[in-house]
Amino acid sequence: MRKAKKLASARQQAWDEIRAQQEIDRVGTHPRTATPLPGARRPPLITAQNGIDAHGDAPRLPADEVTGKQSESARDSAARTRSGLYTIVSLVHPAVVAFTFVLLLVAGTPLVDGTWSLPWFAGSTVGTLVLLALHPRATRGAGTGPQVTGLALGVVVLLAGVAGIVGQNVVEGRAQLRGSDVDRAVEEYHELRHTLEILTENQGLLTLPPEQAIPLGAVYAEAKQQAIAIGQLWNPATKPVPPLPPLADAYELVNIAAAQQAAALEGFVANLENPEPAREAAYIERGIAVDALLQNGIPRALDAVDAAIRAAVVEGGQ
């Protein structure tokens, strides 16, 4: 009987160990914690609720799964980097194409300095064609928004370049930097030439006979206001320091001619309404003085300005 009891106890212990091992295996694959059977040994690490093991640490993923997630993250980062680069290129590329085309017009063609430059023309042409050919490939990874924005930026650069070419001042075959002394002197020289033409044309009103002048009262009033405005514009007392010294003499002569012409026109109209020998003599004298300035004084002053501009360009190029 003792042997039978001993064998029965051994079999019961064996069954208990088998059931304990089965419970351990089940707990290792299930998120819930089970109560171990008596006599069963608890494993060192078992997964508990919320994915935390018995030591309070998060469960470790298999090595191949961790490597896969890292590779996927690296691929995403590389994709974002490529997308950002394509966006930048799609914004800048059209502007670069427009700039090379403007360079072709400025340096290679006679639009600015009046001569062809074969090296610049050939190099700029090749560069422009290559950039145009690369445009689809350079911007294929960018979205529609960056591509449209880049094209708009390129159009702005192109229009600005063409506008600069059209309005560029060129002296002695050299394009002048906008805002420089020579550039401002050229602009004022052209304005003074135009002013001389206006004063000369209005001076002819002082020579009309009364039968032609009387119906033109509005024309005389407008000419007088033009002369007053010209005198105010070129008043040396209010003008800033001229970019080149000879312009100061031109300011003074144009100011005197405009003021004398305004007074002569006023006297001419007043004499038409109420003829008086003294009034007639006064506007005739003023008219003669204005004629002398328009025919001799102002043109000589403008010639001096033109010579000073050319001399400044030659000295600046040395």
Image (cartoon, helix red, strand yellow):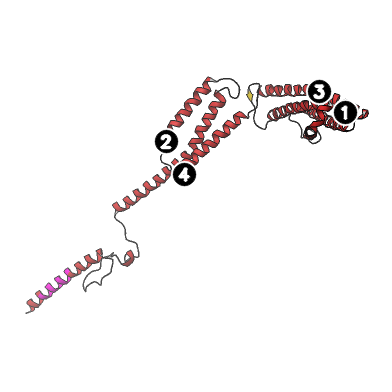
Q: Amino acid at mark 4?
A: Gly
Q: Residue at x 87, y 28 (%)?
A: 283
Q: Secondary structure at mark 4?
A: helix
- Verify CB contact (< 8 Å) between mark 1 and mark 2: no
Residue at image position (36%, 46%) is 75
Q: Secondary structure at mark 2?
A: helix
Question: Residue 185 location, x and y as percent?
Answer: 71, 28
Q: CA distance from mark 3 to mark 1?
A: 20 Å
* Residue linked to disc 1: 283
SS for tag 1? helix
Residue at the limit of the structure toward the bottom, as seen here:
1
Q: Earlier in the sequence, mark 4 or mark 3?
A: 4
Mark with earlier residue (1, 2): 2
* Cα–Cα span, label 2 and label 3: 63 Å
Residue occupied by mark 2:
136
Q: Let me know if residue 14 is in the magenta part.
A: yes
Cα gap from disc 4 to disc 3, whole angstroms? 62 Å
- Residue type marked 1: Tyr
What quarter of the picture does the C terminus occupy?
top right
Residue at image mark 3: 297
* Range of magenta residues: 8-18
> Magenta stretch containing residue 131, yes or no?
no
